[in-house]
Amino acid sequence: MTEAPRVVDRSVIAAVRKLPEAWSSWRTDLPASIVVFLVALPLCLGIALASGAPLFSGVISGVVGGLVVGALSGSQLMVSGPAAGLTAIVVSAIGALGSYEAFLAAVVVGGAIQLVLGGLRAGVLGYYFPSSVIKGMLAAIGLILILKQVPHAVGYDTDFEGDQSFIQANHENTFSALMHSLQSIQPGAIVISMVGLALLVTWDLTPLKRIRLLPAPLVVVLVGLLLNLVFKSTASSWTLESSHLVALPTPASLGEFAAFFSFPDWSALQRADTWRVAVTLGIVASLETLLSLEATDRLDPFKREAPPNRELFAQGVGNITAGLIGGLPVTGVIVRSAANVGAGARTKLSAILHGFLLAGAALSIPSLLNYIPLASLAAILLYTGYKLANPKLLVSMWRQGVTQALPFVITIVAILFTDLLVGIAIGLSVGLLFLLIEHSRQRCYEIVSPPGAVLKRVRLHEQVSFLSKASLAHLLNNLEPGSRVEIDGSRSAHIHQDILEFIGDFRQTALLKNIELRLVGIDLPPPGPTH
Amino acid sequence: MENLKRLFDNNRKIVEEVTASDPEYFKRRAGKQEPHFMFIGCADSRVPLESLTGAAPGEMFVHRNIANQALNADLNVLSVLQFAVDVLDVKHVIVCGHYQCGGVKAAMGDQSYGLVDYWLAGVRDTVRRHDLELRVIASPEERFQRVVELNVLRQVYNLSRTPVVQSAWKRGRRPLLHGMVYDLQDGLLKPLALHVDGPEKVQELFEARRESIGD
């Protein structure tokens, strides 16, 4: 008798299960999106400031990164928005093109280039970034966060939020800023950031962590805001002035708000410079996105793999949109993605909601947001930095041997002392060099004759790439004069042309050294003209 | 005892003679062996292998048994063959029989000789297999000679079927298989099948034989 209602229940459950997965995880994604939004807000403003662009352009870019890219992207956890890695390019591009509107035209074209790159399946490049370099990049960003946020944490807010270059926009470098910051400590900032850090470290140890809608970073921001209000009401010298707070532009009227948007100046497309900037943006933004995508996949607790070509497509649409309404170029960004993961996000709902929040907050409560002390956000980012540059990671990389540890360390050092893109380029070169060394050490053959055999029988592996030339050369060049050797390629599916030419050349050497060379299953190209 | 002593005496005498003219002779021979020939012959004492071919030490890798058998189940000959082909990289594998071979004779008759009967089962098989051809040979002496030759050809065929030779042939035209007979009367080697260096050659050899006997 009780069977019938149960059947109904099951069908209801099945229907609920068919709901898009994204909307079923709102309980974890909504709080995470608030954290990402709070972290993103000063970053968007800071990057806009450093780019020499209108402040609001950073917020537009953040909104587009959340709503447009977030909706189209195949990545569940990556957050997109204005990137610190592009500031140098943006500053010089605006200078070269003469106006921000002309620059916007280049952003739109850059987005179109990304669509083309996605269509050409250039995203697979992302699979070839060595793991050690990606990990080094994450650790370096963690260290940068710590080093760059310490000045903000003590109330030395001369540099923009989100700077990742060694030589900062305010002409200091990372370490001189650290030194200066110690001389101009704001007691109020220290109190707020220390309380914030203490909250972050201890929050997970308390039962309060079970309240999913109240993640620790959110509490940190609220507490910081309240503390500063207390300082202010008591007229304490610890009060943080507006230069140490979030500074979102506050429009007085709707008309003033509309003026925050700017639109591309299409006449700029007649100039070659615009196209040059567009190509640079398209390529660099794509690279930064692919790196962030790889890095975010590493951080994903569920180890999901995001499709890179779809990502390029999403980013392209994002940049076209951003360019059309006056936003800075977007890319995938690691700090916000890491904060997203750290705040417990599970699906892309979090990234999309952060876009909504940015848009909503900028429209409705800009003056309220401007009470948030930068020191509170510094505490959140310091903690994120510590998680990224966890000493355990360093130890585990060290244990994997020099071929992993050295590219890792070099990537970290290079990023710390240059900037993200240059540092990654150095790290990638070193990583590829090690890959080359590792592969050239790998043998492409097996010796199948018994030891001491008169005929040395060398069986080539299934795949013989040009990387294995060194190992084969080592073997053949060490043969005694008068010996016999057989090279058997009958089981190889592919032998690289360079290897075939090398064997062809060795046939001559063998004659000179009186080595009897027998080839099995290897079709040598006819000897070409001697150079 | 007298005879055994003679062996040692002769040995010493020969070494003295050789080292007198070439002091480094034995030292040179003690180095790595790289023989070009592998020889499968009969154990018969009347076949003076080295002296009849003039092969110097280090030139020939030798396996001898009764009636020069190369049986595919004989671990002994297979090991020797594998070592010769895979390790020493010999170029030629020779099966050499001889007329008036006691083993072959025994296999042709009904007499029992003990354990060797088992060993010679293959030769008896060859005799039965070629019954038609042998029956038309009137002279018993000639029929005996023919069986000796057929036995050699059979062993060449056996060798061509071994995994060692099969896989070596897949990689190149080595080793070359040869069948020949030694005539005790005049001391000459008579070639039966030369330069068998692949499955096609084996096929050819037996096609030709079948035609010649009208089988």
Image: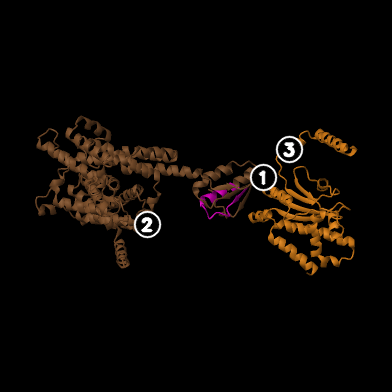
Chain colours: A brown, B orange
Question: Going 69% across and 46% down the picture, which residue do you hit?
Answer: B88
Question: Going 87% across and 58% down the picture, which residue do you hit?
Answer: B111
Label 2 marks a residue whose chain is A
Mark yes or no: residue A246 visible: yes
In magenta, the rendered stretch is: A485-507
Label 3 marks a residue whose chain is B
Q: What element carries label 3?
A: loop
Relative to B24, A269 lies left or right: left
Above or below, B151 relative to B33: below
Disc 1 packing (10 Å; few <14; some 14–19; many ≥20) = many
**On the same chain: label 2 and label 3?**
no
- State the residue position of label 2: A121
| Contact? badges 2 and 3 (CB < 8 Å) | no
Q: Which of A422 and A292 is in front in this view?
A: A292
Query: Toward which corner of the image does residue B197 lie, by quadrant?
Result: bottom right
Label 1 marks a residue whose chain is A
**On the same chain: label 2 and label 1?**
yes
Q: Where is residue A414 in the image (x, y as percent from the top left)?
A: 34, 39
Q: Where is residue A120 in the image (x, y as percent from the top left)?
A: 36, 58
Q: What element carries label 1?
A: loop
Q: Distance between the residues labelled 2 and 1?
A: 51 Å
Q: Where is residue A445 in the image (x, y as percent from the top left)?
A: 56, 48
- State the residue position of label 3: B30
Q: Report if residue A503 lies within the magenta region.
A: yes
Disc 2 residue type? Arg
Q: Distance between the residues labelled 1 and 3?
A: 15 Å
Q: Nearer the viewer, residue A301 or A480?
A: A301
- State the residue position of label 1: A454
